[in-house]
Amino acid sequence: MRVTSKGQVTIPKALRDEYGLLPGTEVEFCDDGGAVYIRKPLGGHTRGEELVKHLREAGRRAKFTMTTEEIMRLTRGEDWGTGRLEEGEGDPP
């Protein structure tokens, strides 16, 4: 494989799959006595940890206007935004 004019290389799919190198994965290049290799940073967060961190930060920035009870009513189909509905009311024919 060749390095592009922008300094980029393509990591073969088999290696990306095997090592979990998904888009957005942090990597670092290491020099080992003339050989260069790529690895995930030591002590770095896993993709799952990064996702949880992102969701927590997004939750802090968001303004929620619905109460938990209102959300639960919607998920149970009890309220379609036009008031409280009894079971079966407002269902499509």
Image: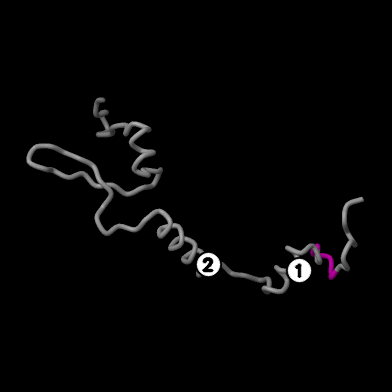
Instruction: Look at discs 1 and 2 and give the one toward the viewer.
Output: 1
Q: Is residue 71 above or below residue 29?
A: below
Q: Please check the rendered image and state whether residue 82 is part of the magenta-colored stretch, yes or no.
A: yes
Along the viewing direction, whichever of 8 and 76 lies nearer the viewer: 76
State which quadrant residue 65 falls in.
bottom right
Badge 1 amino acid = Arg
View extreme (top): residue = 1
Q: Is residue 12 above or below residue 70?
A: above
Along the viewing direction, whichever of 66 and 14 lies nearer the viewer: 14
Q: Secondary structure at mark 2?
A: helix
Q: Which residues are magenta?
A: 80-84
Magenta stretch prevailing secondary structure? loop
State which quadrant residue 45 falls in.
bottom left
State which quadrant residue 70 falls in.
bottom right
Crowd tier of the residue under label 2, counting other residues whose Cα lies within 10 Å: few below 14, some 14–19, many 20 or above: few
Disc on res. 59: 2
View extreme (front): residue = 18
Q: Earlier in the sequence, mark 1 or mark 2?
A: 2
Along the viewing direction, whichever of 6 and 31 lies nearer the viewer: 31
| Residue under numbered circle 1 | 73
Q: Please check the rendered image and state whether residue 91 is part of the magenta-colored stretch, yes or no.
A: no
Disc on res. 29: none
x 24%, y 25%: residue: 2
Q: Position of residue 93 (x, y in %)?
A: 92, 50
Residues at circles 1 and 2 in contact by the CB criterion of under 8 Å: no
Q: Position of residue 83 (x, y in %)?
A: 84, 69
Q: Secondary structure at mark 1?
A: helix
x 59%, y 69%: residue: 63
x 88%, y 68%: residue: 86
* Label 1 to label 2: alpha-carbon separation: 21 Å
Q: Position of residue 6 (x, y in %)?
A: 27, 33
Badge 2 amino acid = Gly
